[in-house]
Image (tube, helix red, strand yellow):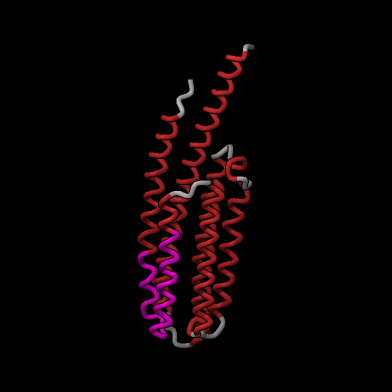
Amino acid sequence: MTDHQIEDVARQLICVGNRAMAMERYILRRAWGIYYAIWALAILLFIYIPNILNPIRQPIFQDVAFGISYGIIIAAASYFSGFVFSRAAMASKLQKSLSRVRSKSLKDGVLKYALLAALILMVVLLATGIFKTFDGVLFEAVTLGLVAIFVYRFVSQSMGRVPFEAIIAIGMFVLSDVVGTISVIITRGGTYYAYSWIPTVAVWLLASVLSFVNAGDELLQNLNAEECS
């Protein structure tokens, strides 16, 4: 085999690898789109649940009801998120080499941190009136801030270059967390807290749509740029 033939084979292998990487990113971007939709629905339920449970007069029963309700929502959202990413990982043959995270770790990572968040929320809600105290408000704000950091790191690890829709989704999540916390501190109550999360629901649904649209457009651009012949 001549040097020219070897160079041709090397170029072909590089081209095929780049096309495979483009397909990898396409699969993961669509998976993230489903993730945004799942958690937008979960946040919407978080907002609506108090309308149903606030009429409960006994504080202990109300706390238990909130803990169980939020625990079920988080557990369900975590399960479906893990399922989506496990399917995406199985569909991709280059998951380990591209993201440096094992396929199993994608699912385990989502479940691990989401279940930990569920446990924290249930303990906090069962603690009498913690959300009515200044320390409780700060604790909640910090916890949600850590969630935002985790999501950003997970996007970065799984995809490398962070997509636009992920930036606006995480940014709005942080903004809602800050605005909601400030509203509680100023008003000394949670009257307007739920309203601060409505934009996050809308933006996460938008991010879900953008993930699917941009994933297809990006895939076509990358494939057109890598014509293997």
On screen, residue 50 versus residue 80, left or right, reads left
Report the span colored magenta.
170-199
Q: Quadrant of the N terminus?
A: top right
Residue 18's place in the image compared with 1, above or below, is below
Q: Is residue 97 left or right of residue 38?
A: right
Image quarter of residue 111: bottom right
Is 212 included in the stretch rendered in magenta? no
- In magenta stretch: residue 183: yes
So how many labels did they put on this image?
0
Residue 73: give x, y in percent of width and height.
Answer: 49, 66
Dominant secondary structure of the magenta stretch?
helix
Kindly identify the residue that appears in the image at 55 percent across and 39 percent down.
92
Residue at image x 43%, y 37%?
A: 219
Give whichever of 21, 8 is nearer the camera. Answer: 8
Residue 137 x/y as whole percent: 49, 79
- Most extreme residue toward the top is 2
**Quarter residue 43 falls in:** bottom left
Rendering coords of residue 25 (x, y %)? 49, 41
In the displayed image of the protein, which residue is found farthest to the bottom? 58
Question: 215 above or below 116?
Answer: above
Residue at left offset 59%, top offset 70%: 119
The residue located at (41%, 68%) in the rendering is: 176
Q: Position of residue 99 (x, y in %)?
A: 58, 45
Q: Is residue 187 left or right of residue 7?
A: left
